[in-house]
Structure formats: structure tokens, C-alpha cells
Image (tube, grey):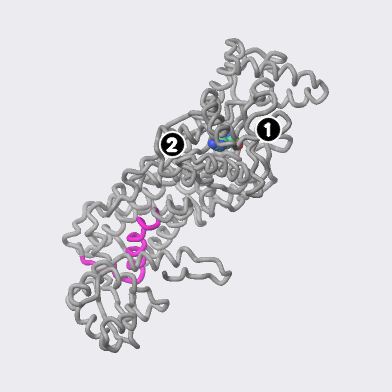
């Protein structure tokens, strides 16, 4: 195993690590096979030995030949000379050097760039090589909003991280099931019924939006402080929902309808989709078999009339599953949901994209499932993330100042409109572009860091066209489109690859070739930030190239090569942005 590159602060530098891996990946196979064909060594051991030198002057790849001294019974320098000869004629190698038992290999830059052209499916849509996800299903539980509550900024991360993972796994060939585990169960619905009956009517609620519903809920909490009898009434109404009482359920259906109408609008803007909306209430009739298993296995203990699973042996508080009054809980429903998902989808992994505040819940849930010998227990994962707050203060649902997501999106779009309008007043479709840029900026900022980091949101920062932002990447993409439009059709069979083999061109080509690996890394670590960071890196590299090299020039061979490189960048940026749910407008 090569050691990951370390930064000065001691953290692993994933970018440097990835660059190296991409470089190694590029020609490793051909080199290893060529050497294996001419020696007694086998390709796998050569691949394992090949390394990327820290110092670029030592080559792009190096083979430490002393590793084979035992097997070949020769001095490392002699081995290096022999293996070097085996590589004669391999056109991807520009230069070879033997230094102190190492065989140092330098790639031929034109061959690297030419390699791009070989990747016939460079539409970025179909993945190259083997599709790691074939035959495997990943369930992703994300967004999972609560009925009767407006979409606030606290739901942004779960929605966009889940949405990005959904597309990233899909890109790698997995079958993905997006699940919105709706919070559609609990005593709060009884409270809301009391509130509607006291200060509004069902018809009025039906015609209004989710904010109105929320205002009733807020008023309820205020009044219930001095009128505790309201809570008894609320409990009675909730019981009626549970018992299937038609009047109570009519209220509930309206709450759901109003909420879903609002939420769908947001999902549309964020390009989020689900395959299932089976929420908590869906499991009403699916918990008993799970409780039976728990009882059979002797895992249920009574505690003050309630049923719990004791987890002392695992340093956790007990997991409460049935209250003394017979009511089931969030955890009970999650156990039933796990069984249902395994049975329905036979998942390979089941991911829960939920804030770190629920760490304990998921630790308990997974432990209980394991104790139940649930078949999918080891494949459950909590994909935790940090908090989002605005520059001017944190938010919370109860009490504190709540920031609604729709307001944040609208404000970002308005600001984006002003910027776009100032930069390019004659642009057609400004509203549409402002929507792509404004929403994209918000989404991108929520996906920029490792999930677990708390985010402080700033409009100016996320909309900075020269920052590490969506608008910067979108702008670069539009620049590619414009160059391609000016250049017209090109022909790679008549490309002069030396026209893109400068340092800048070579950096772009290597970055393009590492895209697949970036997506795989993002999936493996469940970290969409690998994709967002990649888009900025590629945009920066392309811009450096663009400044130093005219794309549209007289010389056809030169132009063919540069247009091709630009085209690859355009497609890759578009696909990468799509993976994280962001539009790539053609002009800005
Ligand atoms: N509705 C919950 C909340 O907003 C999140 C549900 C997450 N999914 C789950 N299966 N527990 O906090």
C-alpha cells in the first residue's frame, strides 16, 4: 500500500493522492503487461510495485527493481536495464532512466493527450471500463421531510447530499432506490388538528400554503403553554388518526397534500427525485412481525410498562420500542423499514443521509438489527453531516429564527440575476440562467466540504464568480461552449497533439483522465465533495490552458487538438455538475 500524501497540517491530501493514482492508473496496465510479456514476472506483481515518484524529475512512474532481486537473482541495476529494454517501442513512454535500482519512466505527453481521443465513449455519460455497480442495489434514505413543516435550511444538506449520491451511484451502474421516509406520524398531527379547529377551517388550510400550516402549529405551542388541556385533546385526535377515523384522516390528508405540494416545488428546483415515498405511517402494520422476532430472541425487556432493548453491553442507553400506552416509536418504524427494504429491494447497501444529531439513534438501530440477526445489518450506514447556518445567526425549528429554504433559493436567484445582468445585459433567457446559477450556487456550497463539517452560509461567497463556486465552474463551462461554437466541427484524426502537450494542456488531460476515479472515490467514501472539488480543479486547469493557448486558430491540426480538449472539458464539467444536481447553461 502506498502511503497517502500528507499535508503540512497532518491531514491526508486526497487531491494529491488522487492525482497520483490517476497517473498510475493511466498506463500502468499496459506497462505491466508489456514487461510481464518479456520476463518471468507477472503483471500483477509489477502493477503492485509501480509507484509515482514524489519528485516529478524522477519520472511519472517508477519501478523499484530491487523488489525483484530475490526472484530474478540479479542486481537491481541489471534488472532495471533488462526491464527497460522490454518497454522499447511502447509509445506512451517518452523517456526511460535507470537510477539507483529504479527504472524511471516518463510519459510521452502527446500520447497522454492522444489517450483521451482513444476513449471513444468520452461523452462522460457511459462509464468506461467495468461498471462496478452492476447487479447491486443501493437504497438511499434522504431528505425525509416532516409533514406539516415547511422546508427549512436544515433540510438542505440531506436533500442535496442524498441527491448527489443517488446520481453518483447511478453513474457507476448501481441500481439506486431513492427513499423519502416521510415524517408522517406522531402526536404533532393531533396538535395541528386542534389548531385548525380552533383558529381556521380545513377548507382554508387546503387553499393555503405550508407557511400558514406552520403558523397554526406555532400558535398552538404558544397557547398550549397556558392551556395544557389542549394536549389531551390533541392526543385524542391523534388516537383517532391511528384508529383510522375518517374525519381525523381527512385532516391528515390535507396536511400531507399541502406539504407535498410545497416540497415538490423545491425538489423540482433542486432536481431531486425519489422512487419511494414510504414514510413512517407506511409501517403501521409492519412492526408487529419485528416485535415478534425481538420477543422470540429474548431481546425485549419491560421497563415501567414500556418495551425496550437493553444496550448496556454496548455502552448505549436502551432503545425504546413500545411505550407503556402501546404506542410505537421512530425507532420501531425504522426497524420495520429496514426489514421491508431488504425484502423489497434486496439491497447491497442501505444508506441513511441524516444529520449527526441522530448518531445515537442509528447506532442503536443498527445494533438492535444486528442482535436480531437481520440479514442486512452489516450493510446499513448512517451518512452523517453537519449543520448549516446563515452568516447572521444559527437557526432552529422551535423558538429560534427559522430560515426557509425557498427564501434562500429565491434570494440567491435574485442576486444571481443582478450579477448576470450586469456582466451580460444582452443575454437571452436571463431568468432561466439566474435560476440555474442561483440555485446551483446554494447546492454547490452545501456539497463543497466533507459532509461532517458545519457550514456557515454566505450569499456573497457562494455567488462569487471567481471563487470556488458553482458560478465559476458554470462560467468556465460556458466559455468552453462558446469556443466550440466559434471553432465549429473538428476532426481528431487530423489533430496535432503537440498543440496541447504544454504543461497546461498536459495538466488538463491528466485531470480529465482522472474523472472516473473521482466519481468512484466519491461513491466509496459517500462524499460528493470529491466531485464538486474536481469541477473547480478542472475549471482552473482549463482556464490556465485557455489563457496561454488560443483555441480558434489558422492551423487546422492545432485547432483540431485544442477543440477536442475543450470539448472533453465541456462534457466532463457538464456531467460532473449534473452528478451533483447543478445545471450547466450554455452561456452566461
Ligand atoms: N424525518 C426525520 C427528520 O427530519 C428524518 C428521517 C430519516 N430517516 C430515517 N429512516 N430515520 O429528522
Instruction: Mark yes or no: residue 242 visible.
Output: yes
Q: What is the residue that sits farthest to the right in this orientation?
A: 226
Q: Which residue is mark 1?
A: 302
Residue situated in front as seen by the camera: 464 or 184: 184
Residue situated in front as seen by the camera: 70 or 95: 70
Vertical comparison of 148 with 530: above or below: above
Tell me how far mark 2 sits from mark 1, CA to CA: 28 Å
Label 2 SS: helix
Q: Within 10 Å of the Cα at label 1, are there few (<14), some (14-19), or many (20+) other Cα atoms? A: some
Q: Point out residue 332 in the picture as x, y percentages from the top left corner.
A: 58, 32
Q: Point out residue 577 in the picture as x, y percentages from the top left corner.
A: 41, 48
Please give left or right for residue 538 compared with residue 440 in the image.
left
Vertical comparison of 510 with 257: above or below: below
Q: Quadrant of the N terminus?
A: bottom left
Q: Quadrant of ligand 1?
A: top right
Magenta part of the chain: 496-519
Amino acid at each position: 500500500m502506498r502511503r497517502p500524501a500528507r499535508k503540512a497540517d497532518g491531514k491526508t491530501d486526497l487531491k494529491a493522492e488522487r492525482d497520483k493514482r490517476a497517473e498510475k492508473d493511466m498506463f500502468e496496465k499496459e506497462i505491466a503487461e508489456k514487461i510481464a510479456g518479456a520476463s518471468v514476472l507477472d503483471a500483477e506483481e509489477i502493477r503492485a510495485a509501480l509507484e509515482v515518484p514524489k519528485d516529478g524529475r524522477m519520472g511519472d512512474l517508477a519501478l523499484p527493481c530491487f523488489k525483484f532481486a530475490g526472484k530474478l537473482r540479479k542486481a537491481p541495476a541489471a534488472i532495471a536495464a533488462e526491464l527497460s529494454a522490454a518497454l522499447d517501442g511502447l509509445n506512451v513512454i517518452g523517456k526511460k532512466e535507470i537510477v539507483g535500482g529504479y527504472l524511471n519512466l516518463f510519459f510521452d505527453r502527446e500520447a497522454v493527450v492522444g489517450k483521451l481521443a482513444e476513449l471513444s465513449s468520452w461523452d462522460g455519460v457511459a462509464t468506461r471500463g467495468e461498471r462496478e455497480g452492476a447487479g447491486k442495489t443501493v437504497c438511499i434514505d434522504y431528505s425525509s421531510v416532516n409533514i406539516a413543516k415547511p422546508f427549512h435550511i436544515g433540510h438542505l444538506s440531506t436533500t442535496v447530499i442524498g441527491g448527489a449520491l443517488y446520481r453518483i451511484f447511478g453513474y457507476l451502474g448501481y441500481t439506486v432506490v431513492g427513499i423519502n421516509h416521510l415524517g408522517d406520524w406522531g402526536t404533532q398531527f393531533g396538535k395541528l388538528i386542534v389548531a385548525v379547529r380552533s383558529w381556521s377551517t380545513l377548507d382554508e388550510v387546503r387553499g393555503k400554503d405550508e407557511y400558514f400550516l406552520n403558523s397554526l402549529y406555532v400558535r398552538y405551542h404558544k397557547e398550549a403553554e397556558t392551556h395544557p388541556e389542549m394536549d389531551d385533546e390533541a392526543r385524542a385526535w391523534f388516537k383517532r388518526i391511528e384508529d383510522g377515523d375518517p374525519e381525523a384522516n381527512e385532516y391528515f390528508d390535507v396536511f400531507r397534500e399541502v406539504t407535498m405540494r410545497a416540497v415538490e416545488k423545491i425538489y423540482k428546483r433542486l432536481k431531486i427525485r425519489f422512487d419511494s415515498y414510504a414514510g413512517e405511517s407506511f409501517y403501521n402494520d409492519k412492526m408487529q412481525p419485528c416485535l415478534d422476532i425481538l420477543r422470540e430472541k429474548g431481546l425485549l425487556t419491560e421497563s415501567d410498562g414500556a418495551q425496550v432493548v437493553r444496550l448496556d453491553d454496548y455502552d448505549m442507553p436502551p432503545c425504546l420500542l413500545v411505550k407503556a400506552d402501546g404506542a410505537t416509536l421512530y425507532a420501531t418504524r425504522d426497524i420495520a423499514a429496514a426489514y421491508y427494504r431488504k425484502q423489497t429491494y434486496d439491497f447491497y447497501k442501505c444508506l441513511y443521509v441524516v444529520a449527526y444529531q441522530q448518531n445515537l439513534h442509528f447506532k442503536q438501530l443498527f445494533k438492535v438489527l444486528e442482535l436480531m440477526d437481520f440479514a442486512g445489518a452489516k450493510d446499513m450506514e448512517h451518512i452523517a453531516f453537519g449543520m448549516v447556518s446563515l452568516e447572521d445567526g444559527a437557526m432552529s425549528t422551535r423558538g429560534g429564527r427559522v430560515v426557509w429554504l425557498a427564501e434562500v433559493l429565491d434570494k440567491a436567484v435574485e442576486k444571481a440575476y443582478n450579477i448576470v445582468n450586469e456582466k451580460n445585459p444582452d443575454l437571452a433567457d436571463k431568468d432561466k440562467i439566474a435560476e440555474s446559477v442561483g440555485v446551483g450556487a446554494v447546492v454547490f456550497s452545501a456539497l463543497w466540504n466533507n459532509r461532517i463539517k458545519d457550514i456557515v452560509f454566505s450569499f456573497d461567497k457562494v455567488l462569487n464568480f471567481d471563487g470556488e463556486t458553482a458560478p465559476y465552474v458554470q462560467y468556465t463551462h460556458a466559455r468552453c461552449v462558446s469556443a466550440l461554437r466559434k471553432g465549429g466541427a473538428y476532426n481528431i484524426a487530423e489533430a496535432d497533439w503537440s498543440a496541447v502537450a504544454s504543461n497546461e494542456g498536459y495538466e488538463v488531460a491528466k485531470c480529465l483522465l482522472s474523472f472516473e476515479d473521482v466519481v468512484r472515490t466519491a461513491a466509496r467514501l459517500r462524499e460528493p465533495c470529491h466531485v464538486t472539488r474536481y469541477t473547480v480543479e478542472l475549471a482552473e486547469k482549463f482556464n490556465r490552458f485557455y489563457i496561454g493557448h488560443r483555441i480558434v486558430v489558422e492551423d487546422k491540426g492545432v485547432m483540431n487538438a485544442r477543440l477536442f480538449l475543450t470539448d472533453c472539458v465541456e462534457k466532463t464539467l457538464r456531467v460532473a455538475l449534473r452528478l451533483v444536481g447543478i445545471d450547466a447553461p450554455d452561456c452566461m
